[in-house]
Amino acid sequence: MPLAKRYNRKLVKNTKTIGFLLYLFVIPPLIAIVAAVVMVDMKKFILNLLSFLLFFAALYLSKRGFAQEFAYNQATFAQAPKVPYKLLGALSLAVAVFYTSFVISNRTFLHSLFLALIAFAGYVLWYGLDPREDKIPDTKDVGYKVALQTINEAKEQLAAIEEQTAKIKNEDLRKRVNATIKKARKIIAEVEKKPYFVRELRKFLVVYINGLFEVTESYIKVQESLTQEKKQELYQLLEDVQKRFDKELRKIEKKGATELDIKMDTLNLQINE
């Protein structure tokens, strides 16, 4: 008999759609809780409430794990998750199944333990466990922790700007800010591939993105009373920011081309020795 292999699901963009099967475990104890309330049976209510909480804990921890894994898979440069949420979710599911089987359904200890092991194994085969290896590309003389921290802070700042953008009522301005964010993300994606650019692009990653955040935040507070002249100034500022971001991207591309030339020259010298 061939060894069982974990089903390799395609990566879905919306992590909320992952873990649908776990919701099915929550429904029976929830129905039992309602039935216990209707029958005014306090003992059954407490027992089924605990069962529900255990299954809900498995669902909650798993969702955290799925989101964490999604972010890890999307990133080119990332450390393995520090908290193994998926493992904790699998263990919580096993405990919930054992408790429900042994305490509520009155099955034997061994039978309940067997069902718990089946639940744990099924979880691992279907969902897998948390990533365990760091994804660290060549950082050269830049410390990988410093590079990773700088990149993550820039990504968090961009996410905050994106969240603020939804509050901008001016559609034209909102589009301009989103276009700027898109350019910034493209640069960060390139820096993730070659983290040693962090030192050269530190001003972009720290100063420019933070400045964009502060301007957006300040605009939202006064957008109702802003004059047309001030709006035009803001439009011009965003155009200048985009031009600067384009310049930063060209800097990366030029650096990459220079590296290729150096490597080609090195190889040419080696083969002609």
Image: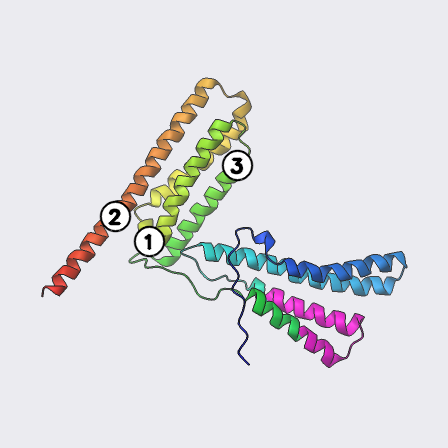
Image-quadrant location for residue 94: bottom right
Secondary structure at badge 2 equals helix
Residue at 75%, 64% in the rendered image: 51
How far apart in space, not on screen, are marks 2 and 1 (Cα)? 10 Å
Looking at the picture, does residue 21 appear above or below residue 251? below
Q: Residue furthest front?
A: 1
Other-residue count near label 3 (Cα within 10 Å), few / some / many at <14 / 14–19 / ≥20: some
Residue type at mark 2 is Lys
Q: For the view shown, which residue lies furthest in the right direction?
A: 39
Identify residue type, mark 3.
Answer: Gln
Q: Is the C-beta separation of discs 3 and 2 under 8 Å?
A: no
Q: Where's residue 173, x and y in %?
A: 47, 28
Q: Is 198 placed left or right of 37 in the picture?
A: left
Which-is-in-front pick, marks 3 and 2?
Answer: 2
Say which residue label 2 marks.
255
Q: Secondary structure at mark 1?
A: loop
Q: Is residue 55 left or right of residue 9?
A: right
Quarter residue 176 falls in: top left
- What's drawn in magenta, residue-wise? 88-116
Q: Residues within 10 Å of mark 2 (few under 14, many from 20)?
A: few
Q: Which residue is more in the foreground, 240 or 147? A: 240
Q: Which residue is mark 3?
A: 164
Q: CA distance from mark 3 to mark 2?
A: 33 Å
Q: Residue at x 40, y 54 (%)?
A: 148
